[in-house]
């Protein structure tokens, strides 16, 4: 007697959440395909360092059978925080993070690489950008790809981030600007080339904030420090200030005025960085973001609950992926699995989004408290 064919599970997006979902599914013998618009694993920088929490990200990595490997790559010393007075660069009391104490740091690229290496060859289809999805009327879905081809699936998992092409099938919600912008820069070989900054930052993260602005610098692996200048401004602050983002000197001059009065050891970040500046306006989805269940399709990670980058997004994305995979493995069918997953994920993400919004307001308050 022939068994039923394996369900066709399509994960859209090879970020941390989508890869965690794929890994847990494969670990339990389930078939899955990941569609990724990037041409290869090294197509772009994957961003800075992440603190992976015991009750979220590490839970997902344990489910994926990768926790021990993560431990060998992570940096427990990176949990260190230093808070400095912006005017004097003297140390201020810091009560510690609100999450658990076991949250070692790891570069996002390293973590993504760990997940990618754990998947069967050919799982990720690189250079396959999904531009949209359409229902086929029987609970299955068709993926529309940018090369004009299509793929059909019994379950589509939108793991394609803030500007998800899958989300519109479930929700009309779109990311909105928070009023806060980060401007990023970086330092290479910092211990040898920028020793004073390296000592100031230490092993983990430095934070200085005041008058509606903040500066934080974060130790990454391989001697790199990634720094962010955070401030409240209209999204079009640069044309309004007659600043061209590609003009490093002009951006520097504008930011030096903005951070006037701050200690020179902190303004070093503006004067002596390697390379240019990257403008990163922060967007979030409405909180809570929910939708009516639709058969054969769901969301995870930023596609489901885009939040300010204050330490929860990556952790929740991986936990989403692991939880969805677990439901698909244990429930009797795809629809029951998706319902079980959404009943867990949606309230959890709503609570987290509210907490992240408060954390952003604390980091970059509208007025100095």
Image (tube, grey):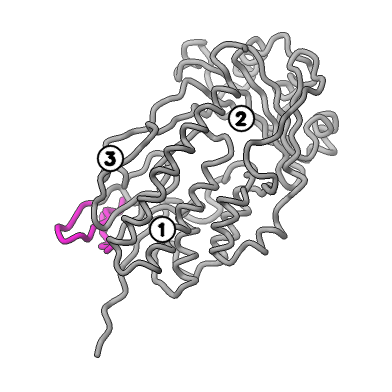
Residue extent of the magenta highlight? 134-154
- Relative depth, front residue between 203 and 53: 53
Tell me if residue 313 can be seen: yes
Quadrant location of the C terminus in the rendered image = top right
- Relative depth, front residue between 294 and 239: 294
Tag 1 residue: 324
Residue 342 at x, y = what percent?
A: 35, 51
Q: In the visual, does 339 lie left or right of 271?
A: left
Quadrant location of the N terminus in the rendered image = bottom left
Residue at 81% in and 23% down: 91
- Relative depth, front residue between 257 and 111: 111
Q: CA distance from mark 1 to mark 3?
A: 19 Å
The quarter of the picture where residue 183 lies is top right
Residues at marks 1 and 3 touching, judged by CB atoms closer than 8 Å: no
Residue 103 at x, y = what percent?
A: 67, 47
- Of the two numbered discs 1 and 3 in the rendering, the one whose residue sits closer to the viewer: 1
- Which mark sits nearer the N-terminus, 3 or 2? 3
Q: Secondary structure at mark 2?
A: strand
Residue at 31% in and 67% down: 8
The quarter of the picture where residue 253 lies is top right
Residue 174 at x, y = what percent?
A: 34, 33
Seen in the picture, residue 88 relative to 66 is either above or below; the reply is above
For label 2, the crowd category at 10 Å Cα-Cα, with few meaning under 14, some 14 to 19 and many 20 or more, is: some
Count of number-bearing discs: 3
Tag 3 residue: 171
Q: Secondary structure at mark 3?
A: loop
- Relative depth, front residue between 110 and 98: 98
Tag 2 residue: 184
- Of the two numbered discs 2 and 1 in the rendering, the one whose residue sits closer to the viewer: 1
Residue at 70% in and 44% down: 101
């Amino acid at each position: 007697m022939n068994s039923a064919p394996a369900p066709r599970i399509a994960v859209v997006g090879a970020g941390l959440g989508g890869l965690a979902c794929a890994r847990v599914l494969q670990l339990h013998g389930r078939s899955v395909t990941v569609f990724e618009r990037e041409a290869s694993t090294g197509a772009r920088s994957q961003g800075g360092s992440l603190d992976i929490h015991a009750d979220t990200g590490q839970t997902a990595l344990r489910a994926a059978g990768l926790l021990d490997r993560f431990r060998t790559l992570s940096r427990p010393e990176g949990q260190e925080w230093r808070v400095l007075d912006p005017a004097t660069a003297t140390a201020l009391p810091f009560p510690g993070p609100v999450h658990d104490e076991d949250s070692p740091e790891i570069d996002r690229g390293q973590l993504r690489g760990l997940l990618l290496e754990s998947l069967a060859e050919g799982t990720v289809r690189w250079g396959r950008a999904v531009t949209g999805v359409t229902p086929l009327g029987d609970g299955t879905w068709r993926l529309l790809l940018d090369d004009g081809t299509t793929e059909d699936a019994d379950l589509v998992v939108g793991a394609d981030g803030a500007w998800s092409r899958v989300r519109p099938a479930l929700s009309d919600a779109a990311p909105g600007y928070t009023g806060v912008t980060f401007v990023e820069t970086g330092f290479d070989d910092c211990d040898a080339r920028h020793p004073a900054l390296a000592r100031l930052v230490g092993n983990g993260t430095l934070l200085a904030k005041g008058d509606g602005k903040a500066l934080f610098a974060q130790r990454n692996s391989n001697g790199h420090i990634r720094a962010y200048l955070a401030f409240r401004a209209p999204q079009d602050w640069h044309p309004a200030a007659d600043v061209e983002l590609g003009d490093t000197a002009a951006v520097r001059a504008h930011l030096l005025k903005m951070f006037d009065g701050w200690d020179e050891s902190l303004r070093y970040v503006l004067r002596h960085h390697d390379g240019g500046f990257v403008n990163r306006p922060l967007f979030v989805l409405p909180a809570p973001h929910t939708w009516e269940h639709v058969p054969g399709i769901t969301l995870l990670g930023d596609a489901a609950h885009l939040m300010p980058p204050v330490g929860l997004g990556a952790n929740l994305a991986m936990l989403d992926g692991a939880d969805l995979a677990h439901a698909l493995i244990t429930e009797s069918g795809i629809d029951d699995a998706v319902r079980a997953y959404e009943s867990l994920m949606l309230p959890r993400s709503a609570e987290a989004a509210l907490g992240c919004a408060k954390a952003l307001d604390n980091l970059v308050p509208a007025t100095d408290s």
